[in-house]
Image (cartoon, rainbow, N blue to C red):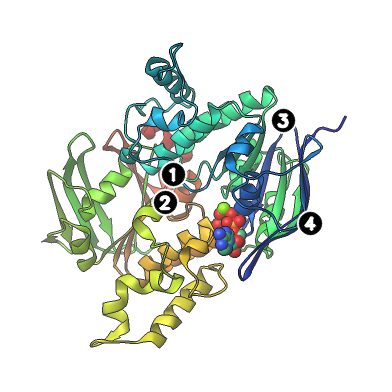
Amino acid sequence: MSDSILRFENISKTFPGVKALKNMSFEIRRGDVHVLLGENGAGKSTLIKILTGVYQADEGGTIYLNEKPVQIHDILQSRKLGIGTVFQENSLIPHLNVAENVFLTREIRTASGTIDWKRTYEECERWIRELGVDHINPRTQVRRLSVADQQIVEIVKVFSQNPSIIILDEPTSSLSEHEIKNLFRIIETLKKKGVTFIYVSHRMEEIRQIGDRATIFRDGELTGEIENCKTADMDEIINMIVGRTLEEKFPARESCIGEVLFEVRDIQVPNTIYDISFRLHRGEVLGFSGLVGSGRTSTAKAIIGAIPRTSGEIYINGRQVRVTNPAEAIANGIGYLPEDRKVEGLILSKSVKENITLPSLKRKFSKGVILDAKKERKTAEEYREKLRIKTPGINRLSKFLSGGNQQKVVFAKWLCSEANIYIFDEPTRGIDVGAKSEIYQIINDLVGKGAAVIVISSELPEILGICDRVLVMRDGRITADIDRRDATQERIMSYSI
Ligand SMILES: Nc1ncnc2c1ncn2[C@@H]1O[C@H](COP(=O)(O)OP(=O)(O)OP(=O)(O)O)[C@@H](O)[C@H]1O
Ligand SMILES: [Mg+2]
């Protein structure tokens, strides 16, 4: 008997102006964690959306489930077939609470037919404990949760449906080591029970940690298959993904740290962050590490005035400045790249070009009241090239771009605004391995020109690879200030938990 649970045969998908998938054929074996790899825009999510009935494939292809051809018309049908999916985009309903979201459309009922809230909350709590994220309360409204916690709720929701195939499209993109470890532990347990996983990630180290077999996509075509992820050569995989030899993951930089450019004293947000004080120098890349929920994003938001602080002072070049809202932050040269790009960073209904140039239109592209359209276009084109934003053109609406390419647009927008103090919240979240190193190079260039950069990141290799100094946060406080030379993953972790 064959152990193939899923088989794709000649799957193609055409969008206006883009052939997202071209004759994809491969199979997935029962009980495997099958990893899909490829650059931003390679077609991974499109294949997943075809498998879940969100999109219909072009004529001529077939999907076999347990060796039987299936036609999947919508997400409900895919769920009935035992396929559970954590999509790349958040699909939760913001004004419902955690438990309501988890059990939406499959409510637990009492004998008399009313919703059994006691059991609903118990079940939800059980999964939250399994994932080791006890700080999430099943009664909290989803819109009040951080991006990372929302991602965890999506995972809880799908796992609690007991599917036989679980698709995870970048489930760890905003999780930190701790939560990822728990997630992987659960995946291993479910695997032993025969559950099959389809797993998408741009975090290279995860391929070996969790993967069994892998399929590599490039421009919608299959370019490589890995029989055993545990023994595969990582450099070779990276080359297959990007289609060229990648020089260095973390481009080298001569550290040249100047005087104090930016200082924060005693920032407080009640019940969130306490006594946050630190200094940031010209030419310095300062990392913020910590578990999900440790207060890193709240710190950034309190600094730029996006959430109100009850105390705290901000100094630039030794002079106290008033920053009580994001507009004042921009006026003082503080640029903040938010972690939640969909909500805070990108206007989906506007073009790539408009998104990149919008915040700097007045300052950079206008002569009096006249807009310098040529310069605007040229700048957008430059960023598109530099960051390898995959789109048929800069006039394309952002909503048609793949997740990672949307991230790149938001990144370009903040670069274009030309601040001299940058706060990047998870700058490479969802970005492919090739473009990641471009982003590190850009960060190097910024500090090389005398800017100062804060990088909030849940990826420890990234923190160690690009930062001069690391602040670790736990429960809303800074617990350590470690020089790059003394920083190790273990040391950072020891201050995080
Ligand atoms: N609804 C759509 N309309 C038009 N084009 C689309 C649509 N969805 C995806 N595309 C295009 O199809 C291609 C593949 O996109 P897809 O989202 O599958 O990439 P991906 O491999 O998941 O990338 P990422 O790693 O960034 O998530 C991209 O060029 C994208 O712009
Ligand atoms: Mg995708």
Q: Which residue is mark 1?
A: 458
Tell me which label, 3 or 1, sits earlier in the chain.
3
Q: Amino acid at mark 1?
A: Ser
Q: Position of residue 372 (x, y in %)?
A: 35, 87
- For numbered disc 1, what is the local secondary structure? loop
Can you identify the residue that label 3 sits on?
Answer: 31
> Who's the residue at 41% across and 44% down the image?
486
* Relative vertical location of residue 35 with respect to residue 367 in this rendering, above or below: above
Q: Is residue 40 visible?
A: no
* Mark linked to residue 426: 2
Q: Residues within 10 Å of mark 3 (few under 14, many from 20)?
A: many
Q: Position of residue 427 (x, y in %)?
A: 43, 55
Q: Quadrant of residue 412?
A: bottom left
Of tags 4 and 2, the one toward the viewer is: 4
Tell me which amino acid carries mark 2.
Glu
**Is the Cβ of the residue at disc 1 closer than 8 Å to that at disc 4?**
no
Identity, as a three-letter code, of the amino acid under mark 4: Gly
